Amino acid sequence: MAIVDVSSRIHSVASRHLGIRVFEASYKFRSNAEKFRFLTACAEEFHHPVLNSYLHELCDVSAVIEYYQTPVESPDALYRLSERIGDDLPANLCIQTEPIRFNPNDTSFLKRTAFPGSSNVVSGLATSRRYKGFRAPAARRIGIGHEDRV
């Protein structure tokens, strides 16, 4: 995305949501509600929301322009390496970025697990949407797990 494109797109968002007819990059937000409406509109325009850790830094429109001109990089080194190398890996090397999780109901994979008495717990909110966990039956559990403690 070109730098000019970011500036012009934010200008159009500012004219729609802030009522600025002459574009001023130094325009300061008058209230938190106005800032929220503007940043929400920018997030919809660019399909990229503002991270919470940057909200206090974005006091004017020029800071928002600078934020959206900054290239986005994945914080995970494994993903960056797999994207950079791509198909140039040797035949005997594979970078697996998505985990293979055991599911006893899956017919495409092995029916046995290396941990027969253990449940497969997904603890994060974002990961629980992508990966489904399962609870081992009570008769198969080896010890008292955290899910048994009520």
Image (cartoon, rainbow, N blue to C red):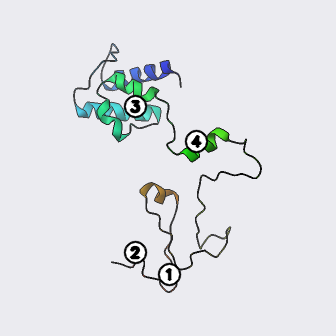
Q: Amino acid at mark 1?
A: Pro
Mark 4 is surrounded, within 10 Å at the Cα level, by few (under 14), some (14 to 19) or many (20 or more) other residues, namely: few
Placement of 65 over or under 36, stated as above or below: above
Quickly name the residue at label 3: 42
Kindly identify the residue that appears in the image at 42 percent across and 77 percent down.
145
Callout 4 secondary element: helix
Kindly identify the residue that appears in the image at 31 percent across and 31 percent down.
57
Left or right: 15 in relation to 142: left
Residue 137, numbered label: 1
Placement of 64 over or under 147, stated as above or below: above
User: Is tag 4's residue or tag 1's residue first in the polypeptide sequence?
Assistant: 4
Q: Amino acid at mark 2?
A: His
Q: Amino acid at mark 3?
A: Cys
Cα distance between the residues tagged 4 and 1: 39 Å
Q: Amino acid at mark 4?
A: Arg
Is label 2 or label 3 in front? Answer: 2
Mark 2 is surrounded, within 10 Å at the Cα level, by few (under 14), some (14 to 19) or many (20 or more) other residues, namely: few
Quickly name the residue at label 2: 146
User: Is tag 2's residue or tag 3's residue first in the polypeptide sequence?
Assistant: 3
Residue 80, numbered label: 4
**How many numbered marks appear?**
4
